[in-house]
Amino acid sequence: MNKRAAGCLFIFLASLFICTKFISAAIYSSSEASWSSGTFKDQLHEIGTTLNILSIVSLVIGIVYLYLAERNKQ
């Protein structure tokens, strides 16, 4: 696998982690009687910051891989 494909894969993983966070919060709050933005924010808080950290790390690694692939191209 070349660096460009690895960079795209890491950026895809970053977006997948963010989507997982929001889908998990929606599933977690599906048993609530009523929905509001405050309720959803509370559910996001319950999910934690692990997915945020993983997405940021994956995004940075992906950008670095893409940068190195373009730099070595010249």
Image (cartoon, helix red, strand yellow):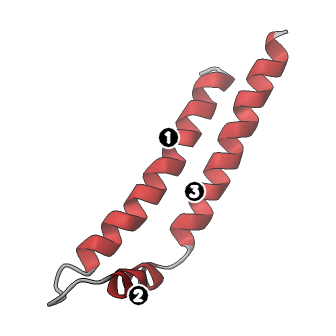
Q: Position of residue 21 (x, y in %)?
A: 42, 66
Q: Earlier in the sequence, mark 3 or mark 2?
A: 2
Q: Is residue 36 above or below residue 58?
A: below
Q: Which residue is mark 3?
A: 55
Amino acid found under the numbered disc labelled 2: Asp
Amino acid found under the numbered disc labelled 1: Phe
Q: How far, Cα to Cα, is label 3 from label 1?
A: 9 Å
Q: Is residue 33 above or below residue 74?
A: below
**SS class of the residue under badge 2?**
helix
Q: Are marks 3 and 1 in contact (CB under 8 Å)?
A: no
At 79% from the left edge and 27% from the top edge, which residue is drawn? 68
Amino acid found under the numbered disc labelled 3: Ser
Tag of residue 42: 2
Q: Which residue is mark 1?
A: 12
Q: Earlier in the sequence, mark 3 or mark 1?
A: 1
**SS class of the residue under badge 1?**
helix
